[in-house]
Image (tube, rainbow, N blue to C red):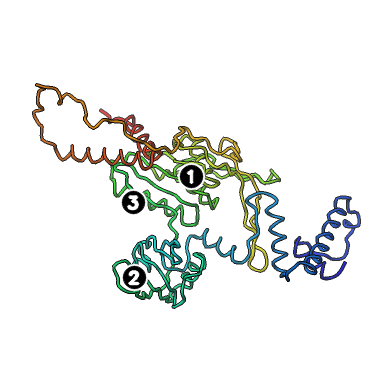
């Protein structure tokens, strides 16, 4: 075998070729077959290099071979080249040097969806609907959105000039911004009257701290009248295992959260909850759907098995495997499936997902009420109410009713979750005495 082919095989397989050891001298038939196939790989590589219609790069071929080997194992194992590895690290860290704007591509330009609060973009006065036409004098037209975003990211404390077209302005104008550390918000919170609504979009390094702040914010906004929490995990694809464990632990006082079992089951790891419940016993509804996967399913499964939350929505995705990032020389990495995980009751959700306690498909609600409401007041000669004037409390109740009706139209699943919390609160602890 040629030296060049040995190098190719070493790169493709991660094997070190050297002098034969006694164990190699006694290799089995399967080992001989392995080396025969490796030799075949070297032959194919040389044929492609010599005869393919266009000249090809060695690195490109070998990386494609490595990625093919990994992707043939399962849908979640893959090879991360330098760019992919760096992007993955940004995603899991949840922060990067940038401007803090959510953008899309429209008509060949980058369109601002919204500036993120307390970021360079928000402080510079960028507005939803603004179009970015140039970055540091370079025209965006012809770029991909990823290319434009990559140009806007960069080292913290470095300046960048954006050329903006804004509706109502007669001419484009330049805005100079200074890049800063931008934290990706994986947790968003909103008070829904007397219930805290918390949306978790992914599990990165910012998730648990974001959850702590969200619960604190909901208590401050709503006060002691808070009736419960809705944790929305719909379309959350997952993320970091340790963050899923921390989020589950936030609502559990004790017991197992999840176990991970590799090929050698003697190395099974179990993760248990510590004392303390951030919600202090408040009722919780967790919303899931077929876009809720991996870390989302760990949280839903743990809270369901411990009966700490009502799981509502539709069956989750069913990704019950754990991927480990294995850094390799050259700032590249392997994303390799190394274990399966199991809920506290010992169930694997691989392929089957988490089945909600209450199945609620997303639906469009249409009112069938007639325009004329029948009531006692519509009858001739009906007695009048002694306090006929509409009070502020009644106006407030009417406003809340209208909001609830609109929510049922816009997001039926969330509407049902809020109703569930309010129903549970009706049967909560009664005052003593």
Which quadrant of the figure contains the C terminus?
top left
Locate residue 390 relative to residue 129 in the image: left or right: left
Instruction: Please tell me in which quadrant of the rendered image residue 411 appears.
Output: top left
> Can you identify the residue that label 1 sits on?
248
Q: Are marks 3 and 1 in contact (CB under 8 Å)?
A: no
State the image coordinates of residue 113 (x, y, percent, origin top left).
Answer: 39, 60
Q: Nearer the viewer, residue 231 or 68?
A: 68
What is the number of the mark on residue 124? 2
Locate residue 117 relative to residue 300 in the image: left or right: left
- Residue 308 showing in the rendered view: no
> Can you identify the residue that label 3 sits on?
217
Residue at 52% across, 68% down = 147
Above/below status of 133 relative to 336: below
Above/below status of 284 relative to 54: above
State the image coordinates of residue 425 (x, y, percent, origin top left).
Answer: 33, 33
State the image coordinates of residue 30 (x, y, percent, origin top left).
Answer: 85, 50
Instruction: Please tell me in which quadrant of the rendered image residue 84 appears.
Output: bottom right
What is the number of the mark on residue 350? none
User: How far apart are labels 3 and 2 at the CA level?
Assistant: 27 Å
């Amino acid at each position: 075998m040629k030296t060049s082919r040995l190098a190719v095989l070493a790169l493709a397989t991660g094997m070190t070729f050297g002098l034969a050891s006694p164990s190699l001298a006694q290799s089995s038939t399967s080992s001989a077959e392995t080396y025969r196939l490796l030799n075949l790989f070297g032959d194919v590589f040389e044929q492609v290099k010599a005869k393919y219609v266009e000249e090809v790069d060695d690195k490109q071929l070998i990386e494609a071979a490595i990625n093919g080997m990994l992707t043939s194992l399962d849908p979640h194992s893959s090879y991360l080249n330098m760019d992919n590895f760096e992007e993955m690290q940004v995603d899991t860290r949840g922060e990067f040097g940038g401007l803090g704007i959510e953008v899309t591509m429209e008509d060949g330009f980058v369109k601002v969806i919204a500036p993120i609060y307390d970021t360079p973009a928000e402080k510079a006065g960028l507005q939803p609907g603004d179009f970015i036409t140039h970055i540091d004098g370079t025209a965006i037209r012809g770029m991909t959105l990823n290319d434009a975003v990559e140009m806007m990211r960069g080292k913290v404390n470095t300046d960048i000039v954006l050329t903006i077209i804004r509706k109502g302005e007669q001419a484009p104008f330049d805005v100079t911004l200074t890049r800063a550390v931008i934290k990706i918000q994986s947790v968003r919170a909103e008070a829904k009257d007397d219930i805290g609504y918390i949306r978790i979009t992914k599990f990165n390094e910012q998730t648990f701290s974001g959850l702590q702040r969200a619960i604190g914010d909901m208590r401050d906004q709503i006060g002691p009248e808070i009736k419960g929490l809705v944790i929305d995990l719909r379309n959350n694809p997952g993320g970091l295992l340790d963050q899923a464990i921390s989020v589950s632990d936030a609502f559990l006082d004790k017991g197992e959260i999840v176990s991970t079992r590799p090929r050698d089951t003697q190395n099974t790891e179990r993760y248990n909850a510590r004392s303390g419940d951030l919600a202090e016993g408040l009722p919780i509804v967790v919303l899931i759907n077929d876009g809720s996967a991996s870390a989302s399913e760990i949280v839903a499964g743990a809270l369901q098995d411990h009966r700490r939350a009502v799981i509502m929505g539709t069956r989750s995705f069913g990704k019950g495997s754990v991927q480990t990032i294995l850094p390799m020389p050259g700032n590249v990495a392997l994303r390799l499936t190394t274990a399966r995980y199991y809920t506290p009751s010992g169930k694997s959700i691989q392929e089957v997902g988490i089945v909600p306690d209450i199945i609620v498909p997303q639906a469009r609600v249409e009112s069938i009420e007639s325009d004329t409401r029948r009531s006692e007041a519509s009858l001739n000669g009906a007695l009048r109410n002694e306090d006929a004037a509409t009070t502020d409390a009644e106006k407030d109740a009417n406003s809340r009713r209208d909001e609830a009706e609109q929510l049922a139209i816009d997001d039926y699943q969330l509407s049902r979750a809020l109703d569930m919390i309010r129903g549970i609160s009706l049967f909560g602890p009664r005052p003593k005495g």
